């Protein structure tokens, strides 16, 4: 992520159709807030990567993770609405999983989605995440706590899926 990506993040994640599924993205997205978030990434509490369009390296979304108290990476992702339905989020999250499991040696990863976000649930299922229950999540940008469907993927299951392809 680069500070110059802030304007694209505010424009893309600021669309209600994108923001409504995200826990911490404010709506409307205040000018300058994305740049502050990018600068705060240096603190290391969260890792985020830009998802770029191959043709011109324009930012089209983000994916990344925070660590749960037990050290499990909890991943998150979003794409600008114009890029939905093209398999781009699945590709980006798949690459993030490879990084977590191969490079960082994570034993498992988790991801969550609002029940009313079937596209995100399908993405998680395609990548092998298994339902692990409902969790209550503080979503201040959405007015308070909401229940999310949590899914987990173990490294051994991920490796078996890759070997089967």
Image: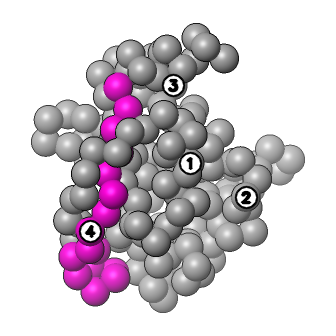
How far apart in space, not on screen, are marks 3 and 1 (Cα)? 15 Å
Q: Residues within 10 Å of mark 1 (few under 14, many from 20)?
A: some
Measured as percent of width and height from the top left, residue 101 is found at 41, 22
Residue marked by disc 1: 123
Which element is circle 4 on? strand
Which element is circle 1 on? helix
Q: What stretch is highlighted in magenta?
A: 139-154
Q: Are marks 1 and 2 in contact (CB under 8 Å)?
A: no
Q: How crowded is mark 2: few (under 14 residues within 10 Å), some or many (20 or more)?
A: few
Check the image and report above or below for 27 versus 129.
below
Residue marked by disc 4: 147
How far apart in space, not on screen, are marks 4 and 2 (Cα)? 25 Å
Q: Are marks 4 and 3 in contact (CB under 8 Å)?
A: no
Measured as percent of width and height from the top left, residue 145 is found at 21, 76
Residue marked by disc 3: 98
Q: Residue at x 35, y 25 (%)?
A: 154
Foreground residue, 46 or 4? 46
Measured as percent of width and height from the top left, residue 57 is found at 76, 49
How far apart in space, not on screen, are marks 1 and 2 (Cα)? 10 Å
How far apart in space, not on screen, are marks 2 and 3 (Cα)? 22 Å
Residue marked by disc 2: 85
Check the image and report above or below for 154 versus 120.
above
Check the image and report above or below for 89 versus 79.
above
How far apart in space, not on screen, are marks 4 and 3 (Cα)? 28 Å
């Amino acid at each position: 992520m680069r500070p110059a990506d802030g304007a694209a993040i505010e424009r893309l994640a600021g669309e209600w159709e994108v923001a409504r599924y995200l826990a911490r993205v404010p709506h409307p997205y205040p000018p300058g807030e994305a740049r502050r978030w990018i600068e705060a990434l240096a603190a290391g509490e969260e890792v985020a990567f830009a998802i770029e369009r191959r043709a011109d390296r324009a930012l089209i979304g983000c994916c990344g993770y925070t660590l749960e108290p037990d050290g499990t990476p909890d991943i998150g992702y979003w794409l600008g609405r114009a890029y939905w339905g093209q398999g781009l989020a699945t590709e980006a999250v798949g690459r993030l999983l490879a990084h977590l499991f191969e490079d960082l040696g994570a034993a498992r990863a988790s991801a969550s989605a609002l029940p009313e976000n079937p596209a995100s649930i399908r993405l998680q299922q395609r990548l092998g995440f298994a339902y692990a229950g409902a969790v209550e999540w503080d979503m201040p940008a959405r007015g308070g706590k909401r229940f999310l469907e949590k899914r987990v993927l173990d490294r051994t299951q991920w490796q078996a899926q890759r070997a089967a392809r």
